[in-house]
Amino acid sequence: MSRPDGFDAVVVGSGPNGLVAAVRLAEAGRRTLLVEAADTIGGGLHTLDLTLPGFRHDLCSTVLPLTLASPAFRALHVEDDGVEFVHPPVAAAHPLDGADAVLVHRDLERTAAGLGRDGGRWKATVGATARAGDPLVDSLLAPLGWPKAPFSLARYGALGILPATAVGRAAFRTPAGRAVFGGMSAHSILDLHSPVTAGYGLLIAALVHHVGWPVVRGGSQQLADALVARLRRSGGEVATGTRVRRLSDLPPAETVLLNVNPAQFVEMAGDRLPKGYRRRLQRFRHGPGVFKLDYALDGPVPWRDPAVGGAGTVHLGGTLEVIAAGERQVAHGEHPDRPFVLLVQACVADPSRAPAGKHTLWAYCHVPNGSTVDMTAAIEGQIERFAPGFRDRVLARRVTPPAALQEINPNLAGGDICGGAADLRQFVARPVLSFRPWRTPLPGVFLCSASTPPGGGVHGMGGWEAAELALRTVRPAPAPATRSE
Ligand SMILES: Cc1cc2nc3c(=O)[nH]c(=O)nc-3n(C[C@H](O)[C@H](O)[C@H](O)COP(=O)(O)OP(=O)(O)OC[C@H]3O[C@@H](n4cnc5c(N)ncnc54)[C@H](O)[C@@H]3O)c2cc1C
């Protein structure tokens, strides 16, 4: 039963984790308030007219395989709330100099056929990971403990624990096979010579075959809007334009879930946190940032290999060796001349995002945390390399450097889009080493952001696990006896 004079639960931050947590709590009967600093709900799910009227751009997340694969979103059935996931004809493409681009299709056999001598090896590594399906994904996204799929996890982990460069060279024979695996692994935003980067590559690539790499029709904001509508239907309330600086700013509630990074939590809690725990939070490290560009285009990108035009996601960087060298430079605080560029052509799957015949384009490269270097020319150089004449198609461009990302959302410290470096140490200790890292030493206060397991991406699992823990361990205060219903 909820308290008539307040809320049972307050959730601070309306990113996918905060939204999932708020919906879970409200649907379990907790009277829930969602507080958001920005004027719009959604965090990493914002869709805006960033360039010209009628061009809809996802400011942050856009390709959402983790949403489809996530146990939280599978349980929430957001499709029933009108969210439509749409798939491009080709999930991902990796153009190469002087050769055909590698195409990664949802269909494993078709992908393997395109990889020639590496087709069998793709099936034995990425295909095997994809075939392990939901039980493996659930084990990877779940809290530490006995996994649902121990054998699949052990098999995945044997390769996944290794550096992507080592697995790329050992598992694949052709430059094309190695390059496409390098591009997949670079989603980790880590030095590809470091442990666990192969694990990111395997998982990200396997998701193509397992669930596809979709976008949401109309933009990622549709997902946030559907979750907010659902929260309101369960009696939840929403306060936007309210940045929380101290826990004492919040209305009284037994449960407080914080969709914020550890540095913000330290600031909010002040001297209420035990010293040891505070020190552990202060040791949490952010990873590299991203330098983001959004374009309004007069037409599709003029790819040298026309097959790339059907791909939702395009990995630009060339060979495994060059991608790895660039990512290593970023990890060491440098800016590569030819950075690895992640590019998304959302209109290929969802033409509603631009006026007829026009296109939007989403692209970023990794940069050292807090970088102030303008990477526009470097990114456009990479696009021109594989699509000569691209610049002639540009109608308008919006530049979002790391500092602008952090200003939009204080969780994105220095432009880090993952909520903290996702290396081996912080994969296990996120933000601290614990079987239940969402719990904090403050009674009823939980962390639920991407700085908790399983980390960055739109899967909502940090919010889901924190809400489940809160539901199990915190009882709402009974209504005062004087109140008549
Ligand atoms: C440029 C970019 C591209 C990305 N691309 C993808 C992608 O294609 N696919 C994918 O799966 N993931 C992608 N991501 C990552 C993904 O968006 C994030 O990992 C995810 O949004 C994290 O969710 P979250 O709920 O933890 O927090 P966030 O989405 O960061 O949301 C946190 C919310 O809390 C609010 N907030 C923070 N502090 C306070 C405060 N003190 N008071 C009140 N409110 C506060 C913020 O304003 C924000 O709305 C991308 C991220 C970025 C930035």
Image (cartoon, rainbow, N blue to C red):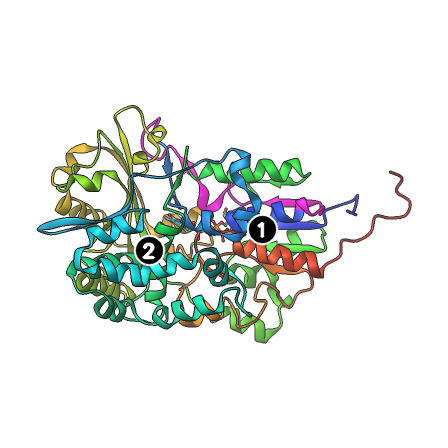
Name above or below for residue 127 compared with residue 392.
below
Which residue type does callout 1 highlight?
Answer: Val
Inspect this view and state whether residue 257 appears: yes
- The residue that mark 1 highlights is 244
Residue 294, image x and y in percent? 30, 40
Considering only order in the chain, which callout, 2 or 1, is on the residue closer to the N terminus?
2
On residue 205, which mark appears?
2
Secondary element type, mark 1: loop
Residue 314, image x and y in percent? 25, 47
Q: How many marks?
A: 2
* Residue at the limit of the structure toward the bottom, as seen here: 276
Quick one: quadrant of the C terminus?
Answer: top right
Residue 130: within the magenta? no
| Label 1 crowd (10 A; few <14 / some 14-19 / many >=20) | some
* Position of residue 297 in the picture relative to residue 76 (left or right): left
The residue shown at (31%, 25%) is 355
Comparing marks 1 and 2, which lies closer to the viewer? 2
| Label 2 crowd (10 A; few <14 / some 14-19 / many >=20) | many
Inspect this view and state whether residue 182 appears: no
Q: Quadrant of residue 319?
A: bottom left
Name above or below for residue 386 compared with residue 180.
above
Residue 4, image x and y in percent? 79, 43
Q: Main secondary structure of the magenta part?
A: loop
The span shown in magenta is 26-54
The residue shown at (45%, 69%) is 151
Name above or below for residue 440 compared with residue 226.
below
Secondary element type, mark 2: helix
Which residue type does callout 2 highlight?
Answer: Ala
